[in-house]
């Protein structure tokens, strides 16, 4: 019976030590750990917020850079198309000017020939040509 009492006393003593440890932990360390956990949680959220802000800034910078590049490409395309248009039109324009000059020369020659041949006289060269 004494052995059982001693064994129970040892168990009671061990249980009291455990209760004392847990009580001390709950009173002191738990509150400290709880505050540390709250601080770490807050710091983690701040880091996440800062990272999201940086990502948003990077996205905005990327968008601005892409918009700028698109504008540069459009401007370059416009310059190239204008240059090509000028290169294509220039030979045609030269030929058109030459044809216009030839047409003016032809009209002057016709007027001169009409004046020389006696414009409006019956049997004139121009009337004969017109009847054909």
Image (spheres, rainbow, N blue to C red):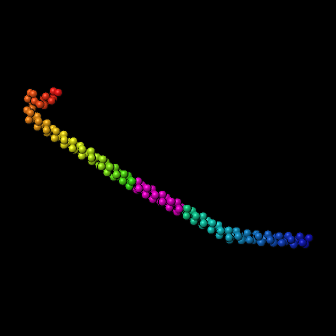
Residue 115 on image: x %, y %: 9, 35
In the image: residue 32, left or right of residue 51: right
The residue segment tinted magenta is: 49-70
Closest to the observer: 99 or 6?
99
Residue 131 on image: x %, y %: 15, 27
Residue at (50, 59) in percent of width and height: 55
In the rendered image, residue 60 lying in the magenta stretch gets the answer: yes
Image position of 13 with respect to 79: above or below: below
The quadrant holding residue 121 is top left
Closest to the observer: 38 or 99?
99
- Predominant secondary structure, magenta span: helix
Residue at (11, 37) in percent of width and height: 112
In the image: residue 98, left or right of residue 24: left
Q: Residue furthest right?
A: 1
Residue 31 on image: x %, y %: 66, 68
In the rendered image, residue 5 lying in the magenta stretch gets the answer: no
């Amino acid at each position: 019976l004494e052995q059982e009492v001693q064994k129970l006393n040892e168990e009671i003593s061990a249980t009291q030590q455990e209760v004392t440890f847990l009580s001390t932990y709950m009173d002191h360390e738990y509150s400290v750990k709880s505050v540390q956990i709250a601080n770490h949680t807050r710091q983690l959220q701040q880091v996440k917020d800062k990272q999201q802000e940086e990502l948003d800034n990077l996205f905005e910078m990327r968008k601005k850079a892409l918009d700028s590049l698109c504008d540069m490409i459009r401007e370059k395309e416009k310059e190239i198309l204008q240059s090509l248009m000028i290169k294509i039109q220039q030979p045609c324009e030269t030929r058109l000017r030459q044809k216009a000059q030839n047409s003016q020369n032809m009209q002057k020659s016709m007027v001169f020939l009409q004046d020389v041949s006696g414009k409006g006289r019956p049997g004139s060269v121009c009337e004969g040509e017109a009847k054909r």
